[in-house]
Structure formats: C-alpha cells, structure tokens
Image: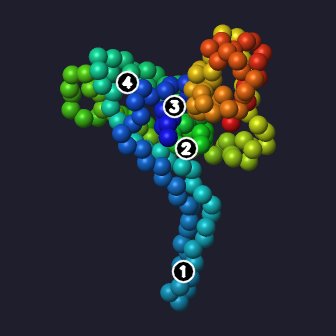
C-alpha cells in the first residue's frame, strides 16, 4: 500500500511526520439532579484535533521549516490530507520548533483543528469532483493537489493518453 504524503494548502511534507494523532471527541455536559442523580447530555461531535511531530533533515532542513512556517502564517482554512485518510478542511492552529539544536536537523510539533464550517454534507452535495486543466499541468500535480495518487487517477480517467502534459480544458475525474 502506498502511503500518501501529508499535505496542507499546497505544502507537501517531504517526509511524513513521525507521529500523527487524530482526536475525536463528543461535546457532552453533565447536569446534577436533586437527590444525588445526574444526567448526561450529548451535544454532538467536536471538531477533530490533529497533533503530531516530526523532523526535517539534511542541508535544506531549515528552508523546509521556513516554508512550513509561511503556510502557518497565511492563516485561514485549507484542505488537510493525512496519510491514509480522507481530506478535510482544517485550520493550522500551532507550529513549534522543538528539540535541541543539531546540524542538519529541525524537529517540530504541529496541531490542526477541523473547520466545522465545511461539512461532509456540503461536500457530498457538490457531486463528483472534477479538475479542469489550465494547460501545462501533469497528472502528478493534479494528484498532489487533491491528495490522491497517480494510479487512482489513471484508473478513473482512461481517456488520458499523455499524463505528462494535460491539455487546457481537459476534465480529470477525481476519485
């Protein structure tokens, strides 16, 4: 099984983080009732919280962290793709450089919070996803943008004869 690289707003991690934690919780409230009883109320799901850590290594490690910091500084929601997961909208909530200083190594921690203003219902109502090529694109760029792999795109688009150069106006079905 090919593991998809983690990506957010066009930034693709060169190496997936070493640890990723996806936390799902429910919003609940407990009410005390006279005579020692209690009642619990379920107020629905809370947004997903994604935390993790990793490191960039090699001579360009600081540049990689700077690129990630720039994406963080942009703010706002974007599509977060986690390895082996369905993409969802999230806000880049925190980024920290951690660990002791070492040559050619930058350790970091991050957190994302799901943006509940984009619901699965809205995504489903949008129908099948299609990408309209602007010319000069290739199938690898389209796969990266939508968090999928080239093999899945090829299977969903048997009409594509030249994956290296997609013509302007071509519609690519996104599985």
Residue 47: where, in percent of width, then height? 57, 50
Instruction: Evaluate if marks 3 and 4 touch, with contact meaning CB atoms under 8 Å apart.
Output: no
Residue 109 shows up from this direction: no
Q: Nearer the viewer, mark 1 or mark 2?
A: 2
The mark that comes first in sequence, 1 or 4, is: 1
How far is disc 1 from disc 4 in space, using C-alphas? 49 Å
- State the residue position of label 1: 38
- State the residue position of label 3: 7
Instruction: Evaluate if marks 1 and 4 touch, with contact meaning CB atoms under 8 Å apart.
Output: no
Q: Nearer the viewer, mark 1 or mark 3?
A: 3
Residue 61 appears in which quarter of the rendering?
A: top left
The mark that comes first in sequence, 3 or 4, is: 3
For this orientation, the residue located farthest to the top is: 136
Label 4 neighbourhood size at 10 Å, few (<14), some (14-19), many (20+)? some
The mark that comes first in sequence, 1 or 2, is: 1
How far is disc 1 from disc 2 in space, using C-alphas? 38 Å
- State the residue position of label 2: 85
How far is disc 2 from disc 4 in space, using C-alphas? 24 Å
- Give the side of residue 130 with respect to residue 42, left or right: right
Query: 43 or 35, which lies in front?
Result: 43
Q: Nearer the viewer, mark 1 or mark 4?
A: 4
Picture residue at 71% right of the left edge, 32% below the top: 156
Residue 59 appears in which quarter of the rendering?
A: top left
Instruction: Evaluate if marks 1 and 2 touch, with contact meaning CB atoms under 8 Å apart.
Output: no
Label 3 neighbourhood size at 10 Å, few (<14), some (14-19), many (20+)? many
Tell me the SS state at disc 3: strand
């Amino acid at each position: 099984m090919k593991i998809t690289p983690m990506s957010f707003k066009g930034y693709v991690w060169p190496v997936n983080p070493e640890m990723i934690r996806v936390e799902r919780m429910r919003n609940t409230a407990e009410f005390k009732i006279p005579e020692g009883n209690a009642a619990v109320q379920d107020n629905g799901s809370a947004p997903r919280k994604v935390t993790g850590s990793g490191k960039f290594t090699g001579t360009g490690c600081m540049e990689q962290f700077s690129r990630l910091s720039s994406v963080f500084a942009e703010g706002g929601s974007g599509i977060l793709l986690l390895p082996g997961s369905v993409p969802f909208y999230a806000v880049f909530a925190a980024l920290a450089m951690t660990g002791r200083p070492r040559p050619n190594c930058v350790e970091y921690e991050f957190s994302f919070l799901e943006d509940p203003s984009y619901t699965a219902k809205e995504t489903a109502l949008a129908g099948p996803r299609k990408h309209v090529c602007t010319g000069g694109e290739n199938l690898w760029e389209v796969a990266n943008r939508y968090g999928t792999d080239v093999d899945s795109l090829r299977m969903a688009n048997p009409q594509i004869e030249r994956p290296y150069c997609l013509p302007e106006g071509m519609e690519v079905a996104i599985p």
